[in-house]
Image (cartoon, rainbow, N blue to C red):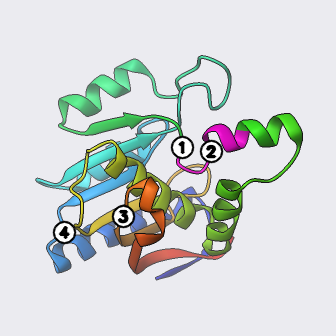
Amino acid sequence: MFWENAGAQNTAATLQLALEKGRELGINTFTVASCTGETAQGLVSLAKNARIICVTHQVGFQSPGVDEMESSTRESLKAQNVEILTTTHLFAGVDRALRFQFNGIYPAEIMAYTLRIFGQGVKVAVEVACMALDAGLIPHGQDIISIAGSQKGADAALVIRPAHSAHFFETQVKEIICMPRNK
């Protein structure tokens, strides 16, 4: 499915398509990029008996020391058995510090920009799946469904078999369920 434009207006349909594909393929594990928890809560409300891992921005992403997810939202999602991962982004880390300090571009940034050819949501869906695998929150060697978007909401969903970051190029995007046509 191709959405005409990127953005949050595609969230409900993206979540629905991801769940339908999960049922079709027998996949019950989902990663979802959600900084405020809103998209994760949308998935929880639609998914019955799914394993959901919510991957947020790292603390300090928007401003030093600030966690974008309210503690009440975090508690509510955890009470609904959603696992939450808040950590350094796969394509950021110290490479981004070098870019900020020295105004250059480094390998992880090049990888991120290459994936953005398919759109921000596709890049983030790949990224959060690998981050969740690195954190031990999803099983190694299994296909999952990863959901993400362009700034707010969700507009991309993938069937993916992520690899650990040290073996990133073993990651397999098995299917693009949906993504925006215009980035």
Q: Where residue 82 sits: x, y (%)?
A: 24, 39
Tell which circle, 2 or 4, labels the residue nearer the N-terminal end: 4
Gap between marks 3 and 4 measured at Cα: 14 Å
Q: Which residue is mark 1?
A: 89
Q: Which residue is mark 3?
A: 162
Tell which circle, 2 or 3, labels the residue nearer the N-terminal end: 2
Gap between marks 3 and 1 measured at Cα: 15 Å
> Tags 2 and 4 in contact by the CB under 8 Å rule?
no
- Residue count near mark 1 (Cα–Cα under 10 Å), binned few <14, some 14–19, many ≥20: some
Amino acid type assigned to the residue bearing label 3 in the image: Pro
Residue stretch rendered in magenta on the structure: 90-96
Tell which circle, 3 or 4, labels the residue nearer the N-terminal end: 4
Q: Which residue is mark 2?
A: 92
Gap between marks 2 and 3 measured at Cα: 18 Å
Label drawn at residue 27: 4
Which residue is at 59% across, 16% downward?
65
Amino acid type assigned to the residue bearing label 4 in the image: Ile
Secondary element at image label 2? loop
